[in-house]
Image (spheres, rainbow, N blue to C red):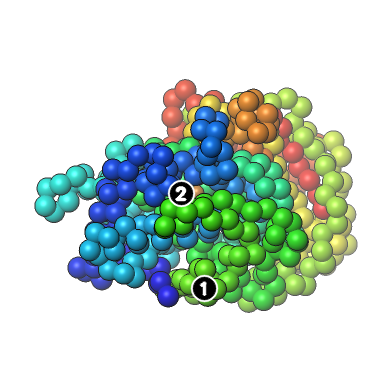
């Protein structure tokens, strides 16, 4: 069984990454038509519309904003890892090579790009095949360029499969539907913060760090499953068997797989494990206890929305969201005082803020979103009103009117139940209006993002 190890835990002198680099260099020598070549492997992930006719079932297949995001990327990594391992063996390397993973969350020191990916050259003076010049300078500088919000796992690892959308929208396809929590949070954020090729789904897999990032996302799926008995994979026939995806094996021959084929890591077709699947969150029991005590949410009801698109750029921007239907649910609530930190009232169990039909021509613009920050204050001085970080990975493709979604853009949903409740209890929610603030992360002049509608839902 192959063991995927923590890239930051590899012992001194370990040659896992040296062999990875040699395989990358060898794969780059192959023509783009060769399924075992570097460009071909990356094109499988692309979203580009210009796919040769005979490759339409192999290229531009990545599943994003979809419940197939996790299983599809697992299949993709599996075949890539085999191809690389076979290449390494052919070059005279070890027979049991496995893809390492980049765990940026468990130690602040690991928020820097792993050293082997940063130097222009190797010890012998040759070009480093793992280095990519197009990344953001902060990533290639060796700084701990990821911040706490990028690497925070709380929302993803506590997401309920049935009510919080851990998996995302049911339909297959890329840049469709809704993001699952793991994809929306740490997955998108690391893509955006590394930037360069990584910030654009068409080219992301050309950056060798892509594969270590996705190995970690794949690992976190297993961590999520193991950490709470209420967490489970989807059971719909459509998800398990309804769609099959095409790849090439390490022998260069076509292979098809469905979700049901990749749910058990110990199955002969997978046969890999992770060095560490322990739960990185400190208080799983309390969280699990709370979610179990809650009845399933009712239907979501739209209680407010902006009337025209909101344009974001490289500055802090605010939007006012009229909430004409805001029920005084929290204020009227007869629950005893002191319940603020407890489960939401029976009247309103869940408050969701959505950014709908987000379109842009910039790759992976990222914004920190805040709620009801007072007019004169800087949002960053109101940590308690921070809603979430939206990284719009894939937004350019989702905005393309010729694309599969006719340019309808991306949607982002944030669970703001706790913040809304606290503000409401403190008398800081104007029943007629909500104020939403956007702070650009890695602002770039010239960036324009249109948010078609900002909306508020109660359930
Ligand atoms: Cu990705």
Q: Is residue 140 left or right of residue 425?
A: left
Q: Is mark 1 within 8 Å of ligand 1?
A: no
At 46% from the left and 49% from the top, the residue drawn is 190
At 85% from the left and 36% from the top, the residue drawn is 324
Q: How crowded is mark 2: few (under 14 residues within 10 Å), some or many (20 or more)?
A: many
Residue under label 2, please give it.
Answer: 190
At 31% from the left and 57% from the top, the residue drawn is 87
Residue 76 drawn at (x, y percent): 50, 54
Front in this rendered view, residue 388 or 257: 257
Front in this rendered view, residue 31 or 69: 31
Q: In this view, does 330 lie to the left or right of 380?
A: right
Residue under label 1, please give it.
Answer: 268
Which quadrant, please, contains the N terminus?
bottom left
Front in this rendered view, residue 49 or 444: 49
Front in this rendered view, residue 429 or 204: 204
Q: Is any part of residue 236 visible from this angle? A: yes
Q: How crowded is mark 1: few (under 14 residues within 10 Å), some or many (20 or more)?
A: few
Residue 120 drawn at (x, y percent): 21, 44
Residue 167 drawn at (x, y percent): 66, 57
Disc 2 vs disc 1: Cβ atoms closer than 8 Å?
Answer: no
Sequence-first tag of 2 and 1: 2
At 69% from the left and 36% from the top, the residue drawn is 356
Q: How far apart are marks 2 and 1 (CA)?
A: 31 Å
Q: Is any part of residue 413 visible from this angle? A: no
Q: Tell me the tag on residue 14.
A: none
Corner quadrant of residue 350: bottom right
């Amino acid at each position: 069984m192959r063991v995927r190890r923590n890239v930051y835990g590899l012992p001194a002198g370990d040659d896992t990454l040296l062999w990875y680099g040699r395989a990358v260099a060898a794969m780059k020598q192959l023509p783009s038509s060769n399924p075992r070549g570097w460009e071909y492997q990356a094109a499988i992930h692309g979203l580009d519309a210009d796919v040769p006719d005979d490759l339409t079932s192999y290229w531009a297949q990545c599943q994003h904003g979809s419940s197939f995001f996790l299983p599809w990327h697992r299949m993709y990594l599996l075949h890539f890892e085999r191809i690389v391992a076979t290449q390494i063996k052919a070059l005279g390397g070890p027979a049991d090579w496995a893809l390492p993973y980049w765990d940026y969350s468990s130690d602040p020191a690991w928020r820097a790009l792993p050293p082997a990916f940063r130097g222009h050259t190797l010890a012998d003076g040759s070009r480093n095949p793992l280095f990519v010049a197009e990344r953001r300078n902060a990533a290639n500088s060796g700084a701990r360029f990821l911040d706490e919000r990028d690497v925070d796992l709380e929302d993803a690892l506590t997401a309920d499969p049935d009510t919080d959308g851990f998996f995302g929208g049911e339909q297959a396809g890329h840049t469709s539907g809704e993001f699952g929590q793991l994809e929306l949070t740490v997955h998108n954020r690391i893509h955006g913060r590394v930037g360069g090729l990584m910030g654009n789904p068409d080219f992301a897999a050309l950056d060798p760090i892509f594969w270590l990032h996705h190995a970690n996302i794949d690992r976190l799926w297993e961590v999520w499953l193991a950490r709470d008995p209420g967490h489970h994979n989807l059971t719909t026939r459509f998800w398990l068997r309804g769609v099959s995806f095409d790849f090439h094996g390490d022998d260069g021959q076509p292979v098809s797989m469905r979700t049901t084929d990749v749910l058990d890591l110990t199955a002969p077709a997978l046969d890999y494990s992770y060095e560490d699947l322990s739960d990185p969150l400190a208080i799983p029991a309390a969280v699990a206890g709370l979610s179990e005590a809650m009845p399933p949410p009712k239907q979501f009801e739209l209680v407010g929305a902006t009337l025209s698109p909101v344009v974001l750029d490289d500055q802090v921007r605010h939007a006012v969201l009229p909430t004409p239907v805001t029920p005084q649910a929290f204020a009227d609530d007869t629950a005893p005082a002191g319940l603020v930190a407890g489960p939401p009232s029976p009247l309103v169990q869940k408050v969701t803020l959505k950014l709908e039909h987000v379109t842009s021509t910039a790759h992976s613009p990222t914004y920190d979103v805040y709620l009801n920050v007072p007019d004169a204050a800087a949002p960053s001085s109101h940590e308690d009103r921070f809603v979430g970080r939206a990284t719009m990975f894939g937004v350019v493709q989702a905005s393309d009117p010729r694309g599969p979604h006719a340019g309808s853009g991306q949607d982002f949903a944030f669970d703001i139940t706790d913040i809304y409740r606290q503000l409401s209890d403190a008398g800081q929610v104007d029943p007629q209006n909500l104020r939403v603030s956007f702070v650009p992360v890695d602002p770039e002049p010239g960036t324009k993002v249109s948010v078609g509608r900002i909306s508020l839902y109660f359930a």
